[in-house]
Image (cartoon, rainbow, N blue to C red):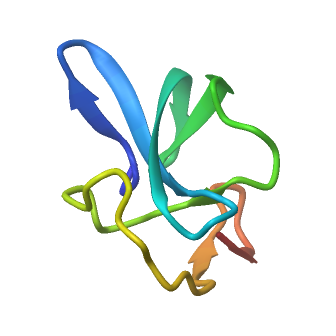
Amino acid sequence: QRAVTELQGLSQLRVVGPDNKVQVKTVVLREATGDRWIVKSGLEPGARVIVDAPQVAPGTLVQPRDVTVAHAGGGRGKT
């Protein structure tokens, strides 16, 4: 949920593209599991999702880094 923004009824995520520039993706969400949303469509496997930075403008050059977050089913993983 930290990565999802809502705009006029659409759910959006910011992702880091192959050129390390921010892209906005419109996604379709399913139900939440704990504090996590399940993305039904609009996001490719392995996408680098930006968390805790909803105001970063599309096209901004960023230096991505991995963060560790807890999985909804317990355990930990990289995002």
Residue 14: give x, y in percent of width and height: 43, 50
Residue at x 50% of width, y 85% of height = 63
Residue at x 61% of width, y 72% of height = 70
Q: In which image quadrant can residue 59 be found?
A: bottom left
The total number of labels drawn is 0
Residue 62: give x, y in percent of width and height: 44, 77
Vertically, is 26 above or below 16?
A: above
The residue most toward the right is: 45
- In front of the other: 14 or 76: 14
On screen, residue 78 versus residue 56, left or right, reads: right
On screen, residue 49 versus residue 58, left or right, reads: right
Vertically, is 74 above or below 8?
A: below
Residue at x 42% of width, y 73% of height = 61
- In front of the other: 58 or 33: 58
Residue at x 76% of width, y 39% of height = 44
Residue 66: give x, y in percent of width and height: 63, 84
Q: In which image quadrant can residue 24 be found?
A: top left
The residue most toward the top is: 9
On screen, residue 55 versus residue 60, left or right, reads: left
